[in-house]
Amino acid sequence: MSNRLPPLTALRAFDAAARHMSFAQAAAELNVTPAALSFQIKSLEEHLGAPLFRRLNRAVELTEAGAALSTGAAEGFQTLATAWRAAQRTQDTQTLTVTAGPAFTAKWLAPRLYDFAQAHPEVELRFAAGLHRMDLARDNVDVAIRFSDKATPDLYSIPLADEWIMPVMTPALAAQYPTVESLKDAPLIFDESISFLPAPMGWSTWFEAMGTPFTPVNGPRFSQADHAVDAALAGVGMVLGRRALVVKDLDEGRLVAPFPTALNTGARFSFLCLKGMETRPQIAMFRDWILAEIEKTAHITANLTIIEGAS
């Protein structure tokens, strides 16, 4: 038996037939006639010296040899497709596909994108808001921005500013509750989006850090951080705002932070891309723009007392 690989066209025909379990559907996918597809599979079986399918009356099924080949063939073609897309992307200097969480997209990226678009009109931005872990090569994504307390050594990673949380509210609410003690009677909003962090990050932790132990239980609870911030902007109550999601509102006066003591979350957003891709023009421009935008509101963090949360 020869170890020489069979023709790629025959393997492609087999892969399609194994996925569909139908010669007719496989032929339609590959835009060939069923007879041509059958000929390719027959030549593959002759090359192997064993049948790959059992031909039944109105169906086919894989033989033991066919089953052994099908998984590897599928993975091989997927790998080839991924590599081809990666090669195509190296020639594209105008399209930039970015994935970020819904809250970061809504509260940090979207309000600033006009400035990036004005500065770089040649770049076509595409966004995919989501929190699930993505395979940047397979999913055809150039940049991911993710919030985590863990490193990502398999990717090119630039950590962004440290993330803290502290009470933020409208100026009107701040006037009604001028002291830490008065906050015990204030309407409090609960952002549960960072409950995955190992250190507790909530109102009771902040009150304890302020030397005024208190564990509030009543108030609206949100699983999405941007929804919690929107409720605070609407005057519903006060929220422990996360740096990236509230700095613009703080800088522009829609929200205020009358008690400038923040808890360090121990996590941060990171700018991620495939290693070796960070020098592509549109990726480098986007990275440099993000870092410059963060620097514009660095004065807010500079004026805070940032302490470690409870471990």
Image (cartoon, helix red, strand yellow):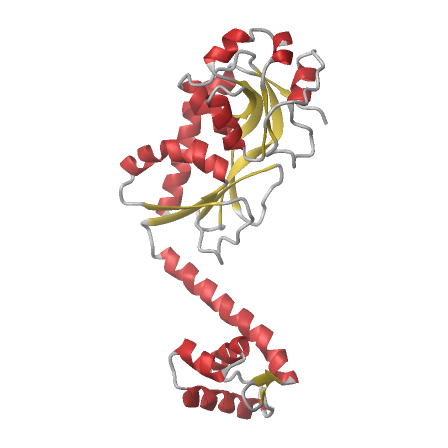
In this rendering, the answer to whether 75 lies above or below 116 is below
Residue nearest the observer in this picture, 43 or 33: 33
Query: Is residue 40 shown above or below 185?
Result: below
Examine the image and state in which quarter residue 251 appears: top left
Q: Residue at x 52, y 21 (%)?
A: 236
Q: Position of residue 215 (x, y in %)?
A: 70, 19
**Picture coordinates of residue 63, whole percent (x, y):** 63, 85
Q: Which quadrant is home to the C terminus?
A: top right
Q: In the picture provided, is 18 more to the left or to the right than 97? A: right
Q: Give how far across and how far down residue 246 sits, in percent.
A: 48, 25
Residue under the image location 34 percent in, 50 percent down: 95
Residue under the point 46% across and 91% down = 39
Q: Is residue 7 above or below residue 120?
A: below
Residue in front for this viewpoint, 288 or 132: 132
Across the whole image, how many numbered discs are drawn on residues?
A: 0
> Residue 98: x, y in percent?
43, 45
Quarter of the image where the N terminus is located: bottom right
Depth order, front residue of 56/54: 56
Please tell me whether residue 142 is drawn above or below residue 183 in the rendered image.
Answer: below
